[in-house]
Image: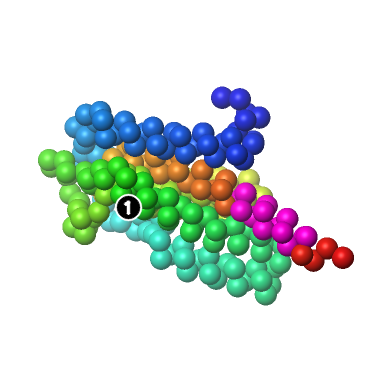
Amino acid sequence: MNQSRLRNPYTSTAIYLTLTLLIGIFVVLLPLNDPECNIVLNLQNFAQKTIGLQAFQVLTYLGDFYLWVIFASIYLLYAYFRSRKQLGSAIELGIFLVITTALTYFLKVAFTRPRPNCSGISVYSEDLISSFSYPSGHVSRATGAFLISSRGSRTKESLAVIAVFLVSLSRIILGAHYLTDVVGGVFLSLAAQRLANLGMLLLRSKMEKIFRP
């Protein structure tokens, strides 16, 4: 894919949103549940035979909604009072969380894909059964939130990618999501991240006009 297109925020946003929608259409129209159930079952069996499911029950909270709301609030206060250089990043994180939460909710309702109901798997929370599966909210939150928070440091960015991978893996291993739910969550997050960045650019432009002498 042309790299210059991905650098354009409008083009890349459209591409990532289109990919998210296409995957959603595929999971509704194509018989993907059975082969994806095999992926869930194999990963869960492997985890149970090695480190156990408990580690993934902890890792999955790295994408928790309340965790990121608390972190974003603390980050915003810290940036405002102690480190104004990070204020833009803190505001962008807050905008991102609003956008990705709204888009995730809309797409879950639009596609209404049930949670994995696979023979032989253990579901770590029965509350999940009453909610929809596509796309993964944990993954969509974690992807953009980690990338925004780690921006500017190669080491932090590398750790962010590892964290996103672990959250994604945990959602499948715990029987909360199919693989396509996770992939769709990543693309949705990348789109939401770019929308948040565009929002920041517009906000800065308006503020400069207001305070321009």
Crowd rating for badge 1 (residues with CA inside 10 Å; few <14, some 14–19, many 20+) = some
Q: Is residue 167 visible?
A: no
Q: Position of residue 164 (x, y in %)?
A: 45, 47
Q: Which residue is mark 1?
A: 56
Q: Residue at x 22, y 45 (%)?
A: 114
Q: Residue at x 78, y 60 (%)?
A: 209
Say which quadrant the C terminus sits in.
bottom right
Residue 20 placement: quadrant: top left
Q: Position of residue 56 (x, y in %)?
A: 32, 52
Main SS, magenta region, reads helix
Amino acid type assigned to the residue bearing label 1 in the image: Phe
Q: Is residue 142 left or right of residue 153?
A: left
Say which quadrant the N terminus sits in.
top right
Q: Is residue 199 magenta?
A: yes
Q: Is residue 56 visible?
A: yes
Q: Relative to 201, does residue 66 appear above or below in the rendering?
A: below
